[in-house]
Structure formats: structure tokens, C-alpha cells
Image: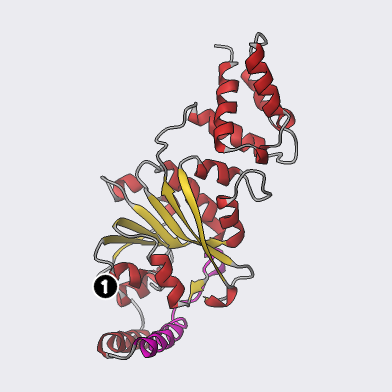
């Protein structure tokens, strides 16, 4: 429970929020003042990768990347994004927050919020939401954003939309096309199942404390590919192994994998030519479809 001084601050702020009927621009300034004041109540924790968004316009734009449906917000912090999600009558929101100080704040400030205290990466989402689809949204902590997206992939058949704010470099990597320097493991694995949109960039001064790098907002929408036309486990292994030595031709980066597969030396000439073509290229040059084809070629040469 928050101490009496903090509680009185929250109560006063909530009263202002409900009672003041000001023009939009004045109301915006008032809310900005309130949030700036409340920033003093929850301290950003470096080990949790916390950088609290303070720009309400950006928060509203992020919230609007999800239109409707059951939605999980990861890391609600002080509810800057949460407030707009709660205002949408078409969204059924569940917030997940690991920081106890933020949890106390959210319970005080948004008592109507369905709030789960815990680590998103460790939660069983099938138990949390037993049936149906659900979206994922958040101002994701920089230090675990990649892990969050890998977990989203585990539930890809249940998550139609995943959106939110991450480090700009990671956003560029996820949205990158083949042939670009940023194209990598996340690019291939996520683009295999999702259409990626890089929506806009967010400057450092819009956070408290300000991060040392810019941020970006992305939206991932599930594509029509329900299953890959290959062995999905082998596909994942091929992609990760290839990018472990991204500057080398894949005949070198995939050498350990090829040897472990014990490829059959009796190969048809057409397949041999196609496989040789792939092995002389670097991983960032291959599209998702080409990685699927490469996976099938390797799989077909495995000794049964």
C-alpha cells in the first residue's frame, strides 16, 4: 500500500482528472503536469530497463495500434499507455507488471484495471487466457524486448497483433528487408509469420529518465501463413546457425549443421545446383521464402 503522502497526491490528481472540464489543449497541459508530478512517485529501475514515456500524444498513438479484442499490456509502469487502452470500449485489457512499486501505483490509480503481478516471460499465457486470441502491446523494456518477441512467436497462433515501442535499432532489425545490414534472426523468424510495420520514431526526451538511444513504434500483424512449408524446427535452427556468422558464406556458417545432418551424397543435379547457390550466399541475402527452400533442400538430403 502506498504511504499517506503518496495516496493524497494520487487522490488529488484523480480528482482533477475527473472534475476539470477544460479545453483539449488546456486539459493536455494539466495531464502533463499531473503525470510529471506522479513521476516522482515511481522510480525507474535500471535493472528492469524502465524508461517511462511522458508524451501523452505518443502514448495515445501507441494505444491506437490495437483496435479491439482481448489485449495484454506488458509493463504498464504508471499507466501512461494503460489509460488510453482502458478508454477503448472494444478492448478487454489485462496488464502485466513485474515492478511492485508500479503495481501499487496502478492499483491506486486504476482500480478497475485487470492487473497481474508477474514476469511476462515466465507466465503461462494459456493459463492466463485459456481460450481465444489476444493482442500484445506495451512500452517494452529494452533489455528483454527480443525475448518478448520470441515468446510471442511461441503463441503466434493466438496473437493476431503485437505492437508497441522498442529500441529503434531493434525495430529496424525486425522490419528490415533482405540485403540490409540490420536484417537478421529476428527479421526472418518474425517476418515468417507476421507483416511488420515500422510506424514512427520516438525521441529520447519523451521519456523519464531519457534513454541514450531513440525508440520506435512497430506493429506486427499475423499473416496468412498458418504453417511454414518446411520442418519449422529445422527452419529455426538453419536461420539461427546461418546468422551466427553472418559475414561468412553459408557454406561456412552452416558447416557444423550440414555435417551433423549427415547429408546423403547422392543428390540430384537440380537440387545440387540450387543448394550450392544458397551455400555461396550470406544469410542476409536470403528472403524468408528462400530460407524455407534451403531448409527443405537440407531436409531432403538427410539420411533417413
Identified at 40% across, 43% down, the residue is 156
Residue 82, given in percent of the width and then of the height, sits at 36, 69
Residue 290, given in percent of the width and then of the height, sits at 59, 32
Left/right placement of residue 115 relative to residue 301 reads: left
Residue range in magenta is 24-50
Identified at 67% across, 17% down, the residue is 272
Residue under label 1: 111
268 and 174: which one is in front? 268
Image quarter of the N terminus: bottom left
Secondary structure of the residue carrying numbered label 1: loop
Q: Quadrant of residue 34?
A: bottom left
Q: Quadrant of residue 138?
A: bottom left
Disc 1 residue crowd, few under 14, some 14–19, many 20+, Cα 10 Å: few
Image quarter of the C terminus: top right
Q: Is residue 1 above or below residue 9?
A: above
245 and 127: which one is in front? 245
Identified at 42% across, 37% down, the residue is 225
Q: Quadrant of residue 279?
A: top right
Which SS type dominates the magenta stretch? Answer: helix
213 and 95: which one is in front? 213
Identified at 24% across, 66% down, the residue is 89
User: Does the image show residue 77?
Assistant: no
User: Does the image show residue 23?
Assistant: yes
Farthest top residue in view: 266
Residue 211, given in percent of the width and then of the height, sits at 60, 71
Amino acid at each position: 500500500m502506498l504511504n499517506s503522502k503518496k495516496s493524497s497526491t494520487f487522490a488529488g490528481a484523480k480528482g482533477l482528472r475527473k472534475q476539470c472540464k477544460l479545453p483539449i489543449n488546456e486539459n493536455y497541459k494539466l495531464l502533463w503536469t499531473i503525470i510529471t508530478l506522479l513521476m516522482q512517485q515511481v522510480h525507474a529501475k535500471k535493472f528492469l530497463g524502465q524508461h517511462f514515456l511522458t508524451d501523452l500524444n505518443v502514448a495515445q498513438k501507441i494505444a491506437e495500434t490495437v483496435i479491439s479484442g482481448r489485449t495484454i499490456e506488458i509493463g504498464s509502469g504508471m499507466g501512461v499507455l494503460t489509460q488510453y487502452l482502458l478508454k477503448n470500449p472494444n478492448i478487454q485489457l489485462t496488464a502485466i507488471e513485474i515492478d511492485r512499486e508500479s503495481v501499487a501505483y496502478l492499483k491506486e490509480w486504476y482500480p478497475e484495471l485487470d492487473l497481474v503481478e508477474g514476469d511476462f516471460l515466465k507466465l503461462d499465457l494459456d493459463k492466463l487466457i485459456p481460450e481465444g486470441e489476444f493482442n500484445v502491446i506495451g512500452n517494452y523494456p529494452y533489455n528483454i524486448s527480443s525475448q518478448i518477441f520470441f515468446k510471442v512467436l511461441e503463441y503466434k497462433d493466438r496473437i493476431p497483433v503485437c505492437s508497441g515501442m522498442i529500441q529503434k535499432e531493434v525495430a529496424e532489425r525486425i522490419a528490415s528487408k533482405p540485403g540490409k545490414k540490420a536484417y537478421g534472426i529476428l527479421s526472418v523468424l518474425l517476418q515468417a509469420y507476421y507483416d511488420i510495420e515500422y510506424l514512427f520514431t520516438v525521441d529520447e526526451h519523451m521519456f523519464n529518465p531519457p534513454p541514450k538511444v531513440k525508440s520506435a513504434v512497430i506493429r506486427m500483424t499475423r499473416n496468412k501463413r498458418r504453417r511454414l512449408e518446411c520442418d519449422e524446427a529445422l527452419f529455426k535452427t538453419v536461420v539461427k546457425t546461418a546468422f551466427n556468422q553472418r559475414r561468412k558464406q553459408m557454406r561456412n556458417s552452416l558447416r557444423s549443421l550440414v555435417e551433423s545432418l549427415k547429408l546423403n551424397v547422392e543428390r540430384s543435379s537440380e537440387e545440387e545446383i540450387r543448394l550450392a547457390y544458397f551455400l555461396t550466399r550470406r544469410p542476409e541475402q536470403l528472403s524468408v521464402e528462400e530460407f524455407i527452400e534451403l531448409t527443405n533442400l537440407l531436409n531432403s538430403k538427410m539420411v533417413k
